[in-house]
Image (cartoon, rainbow, N blue to C red):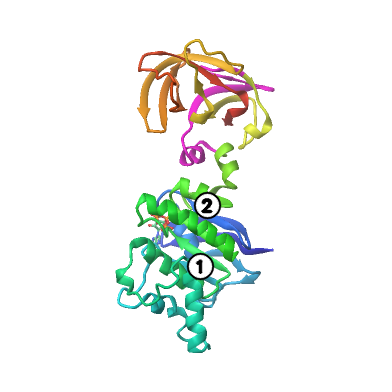
Amino acid sequence: MSIISLSGVQKHFGDYHALRGIDLEIAGGEFFSLLGPSGCGKTTLLRVIAGFEDVSEGTVLLSGRDMEGVPANRRPTNMVFQSYAIFPHLSVAENVGFGLRRAAMSRGEKAAAVEEALGMVGLAGYGARKANALSGGQRQRVALARALILKPKVLLLDEPLSALDKKLREQMQAELRRLQRSVGITFILVTHDQEEALIMSDRIAVMFEGRIAQLADPQTLYRRPVSRQVAQFIGMMSFLPGRIAGAEVTVAGLGRASVEDDQCPAGRADGDVSVGIRPELLSLLAPGEDTDRQLAHGAVTERTYYGDMTYYDVALDGTDAEVTISMKNLPGRAVLERGDAARVAWDARSLVIFP
Ligand code: ATP
C-alpha cells in the first residue's frame, strides 16, 4: 500500500496557481525525490504533505488516512529544513532530544534514544558538544538525528544539502542514502540538483510550473525522457530535426535508422520530429579507426576540456544542427582541434524521438 497518496491536488496563493493537479503515490521505504527548477512548486508540494500548507483542492492521504484538517504535528511526517534550524546555544544532545521533551519517557530512555539517533548519523559521542562548535556537515547531521529520533514514517527533506560545499555534499549524499536504507523509512527529498536526484532516488518526479512532467526511476528518466524540457533538465542532450515514416526515422546529419516504440516516450506518429541524443552515446573516431556502428561526418566547432572528459561540438554535414559529443580523456587518445574533420559513430537505439 502507498504510504502517501495525493490526488487532484491544487494549490493557489491568491492569484498564483502553484500546484496544478498533482496525482502521486509513494510507497513505504521509498527514497523519492521532487526535482525541478526554482519556483516549480516542489517545496509547496512538500509542505502540503507535511501539513504546513492546506490544499485548495484534492486529497492527501498518509497511510490511507485523509489528512484534511490534521495539523503538521499530528502527521506521521517530520521535516528537515534547508537552513538546519538547530539551536546554536544548546548542546548536540539537547538539540537532538528537543522533540522528546514532552514524551512520556524516563531521562535514561531519552538519553538512550538520543545516543541511538546520533549513532545513526555518525555522531556517536558528540552529545555534549555545543551545536555552534560544529561544522556545516555535522550540523546537518544533528538536524537529521533530531528528525529521526521521533521515528517518523516519512522524512521530508527540503534541499538539506544545499548549504554544503561540493565535496561534503557528495559525502552526505552517500550517507543519506545509506541511512535511508538502514532505517527503512520513506524519504522525500526536494532538490533542484539533477545529479543529486539521480544518485540518491528510487524514483523521481520532475516538476515544471506546478505539474509533474515525468515520474520514473533514474535510468528511465535519463534514457527515455518524455519531453525535450525533461531531457535538458536531466543532463545534456543534442537535438536534430527528423522525420518518421513507418518503421524508420530520417535524421538530419546522421541518416536513416529504424525506431522502436520505447524510443518515443511521448508517443509515436509519422511526421516531423525532434531527435535527441546524449553526448556519451556519440563517439569521435580517431583518424583511420574503423567502426561497426553507423557513421556521420562533420567538423569540430568547439572543444571544452573537463579534466576526465572533453566535450566536442560538431557541426554535421548537410544540416545546420550541431551535436555535443563527450569523450573520456584516455592516455594516447587523439585530440581533435576546432575546424578538424570529424567522423561520428552512433547507434539507432540511442536516439530518443520527440513529437
Ligand atoms: P525553490 O527551489 O526556489 O525553493 P520551489 O520549486 O520549491 O522553488 P515553491 O517554493 O514551491 O517553489 O514555490 C512555487 C511558487 O509559489 C513560487 O512562484 C512562489 O513564489 C509561490 N509561493 C510559494 N509560497 C507562497 C506563499 N506563501 N504566498 C505566495 N506565493 C507563494
Tell me the number on the disc at residue 120.
Answer: 1
Coordinates of residue 199 in the picture (x, y in percent): 51, 48
Magenta stretch encompasses residue 251: yes
- For the C terminus, give its image quadrant: top right
In front of the other: 78 or 335 = 335
* Left or right: 111 in relation to 83: right
Coordinates of residue 336 in the picture (x, y in percent): 39, 18
Q: What is the magenta range?
A: 227-256
Residue at point 61% right, 68% down? 61
Asked if residue 150 is positioned above or below residue 186 in the image, the reply reads below
Residue that extends furthest to the top in the rendered view of this protein = 288
Coordinates of residue 281 in the picture (x, y in percent): 54, 28
In front of the other: 302 or 127 = 127
Residue at point 32% right, 74% down? 130
In front of the other: 59 or 306 = 306
Query: Disc 1 to disc 2, how far (Cα)?
Result: 18 Å
Q: Quadrant of residue 23?
A: bottom right
- For the N terminus, give its image quadrant: bottom right
- Disc 2 marks which residue? 200
Magenta stretch encompasses residue 334: no
Circle 1 sits in a helix, a strand or a loop, which is it?
A: helix
Residue at point 56% right, 57% down? 31
Residue at point 55% right, 73% down? 151
Circle 2 sits in a helix, a strand or a loop, which is it?
A: helix
Asked if residue 63 is positioned above or below residue 40 in the image, the reply reads below
